[in-house]
Amino acid sequence: MLAATPIGDPDDASPRLRNLLARADLIAAEDTRRLRALAVRLEVSIGGRVVSYHEHNEAGRGDDLVRAAQDGQIVLVVTDAGMPAVSDPGYRVVRAAAEAGVPVTAAPGPSAVLTAIALSGLPSDRFCFEGFLPRKAGDRRRALSALATEQRTMVFFESPHRIEATLTAMAGVFGEARQAAACRELTKTYEEVCRGPLAELVEWASGEMRGELTVVVAGAAPVVSRPEDYTGAVLERVASGERLKDAAAAVATAVGVSKRELYEAALRER
């Protein structure tokens, strides 16, 4: 069983999470101390055994969790905040359980990704989650460059001491005018959402920053194809012996422009 934990405000904990914390035979927590602190805030008494389950031991510990579930135990996986397996440990044990034929389900709940998208004011009908960008400047820029033409809204996680560098890199690759929102301390007392072009967000991030951040960036504008952009490809096919009409039809179908308009454009340029 995977269970989402509060990303900030403990009042967001679901009754189902409280019940699972009390009933589970084995709880695998990203940080056992934080789990016990959460249980205190929720006034829940943990009845089962608690073990650590984080990025450094998940490969080996996952087998133990699967075996416990096969033995009939109620096994619960939680992370420090949000849903397990979303930029946190969890997906490996789900895969191992599925391969072993062990049923896996989830108690849904708070999500920094969805909360940030909802608060961003940016299109949410299609989005992609990119998690944390690489720490090194060159690797980070290459990762962003690969997303330069991504048309879906993009969601990133970032730490307070890297946020200015990350926003600066985004402005350099996506353009300073690209709309974005930086969400800090979501659901907590000092929650803050800064919306605007990336250039303004860079300036906002230049001061002292605390708390984890979720950054939402608008996707790239669709590239509108013009028939005139593809006349060269048509004429190359004609030079190879293909009829102009057939060449124009083939290229137009491949690139998604009007066959008639491309034919006429190629005819003028011939």
Image (tube, grey):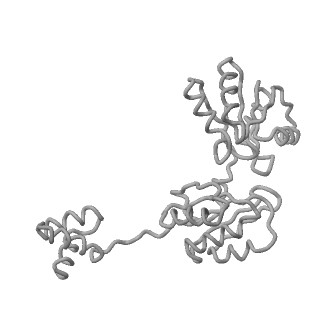
- Residue at the (58%, 54%) spot, across then down: 129
Which quarter of the figure has residue 123? bottom right
Residue 79, above or below 99: below
Which quarter of the figure has residue 255? bottom left
- Residue at the (30%, 75%) spot, across then down: 229
Residue toward you, 6 or 12? 6
> Which image quadrant: the N terminus?
top right
Q: Position of residue 117 (x, y in %)?
A: 62, 58
> Which image quadrant: the C terminus?
bottom left
Taking 30 as reference, is 126 left or right?
A: left
Give the total of numbered labels: 0
Which quarter of the figure has residue 93? top right
Q: Position of residue 45 (x, y in %)?
A: 86, 31
Q: Position of residue 268 (x, y in %)?
A: 18, 82
Taking 41 as reference, is 152 left or right?
A: left
Taking 116 as reference, is 99 left or right?
A: left
Taking 228 as reference, is 23 left or right?
A: right
Question: For the view shown, which residue lies furthest in the bottom direction?
Answer: 268
- Residue at the (20%, 71%) spot, across then down: 236
Residue toward you, 29 or 135? 135
Residue 10, above or below 174: above
Question: For the view shown, which residue lies furthest in the top direction?
Answer: 71
Q: Position of residue 213 (x, y in %)?
A: 72, 60
- Residue at the (81%, 26%) spot, across then down: 48
Residue 199, above or below 185: below
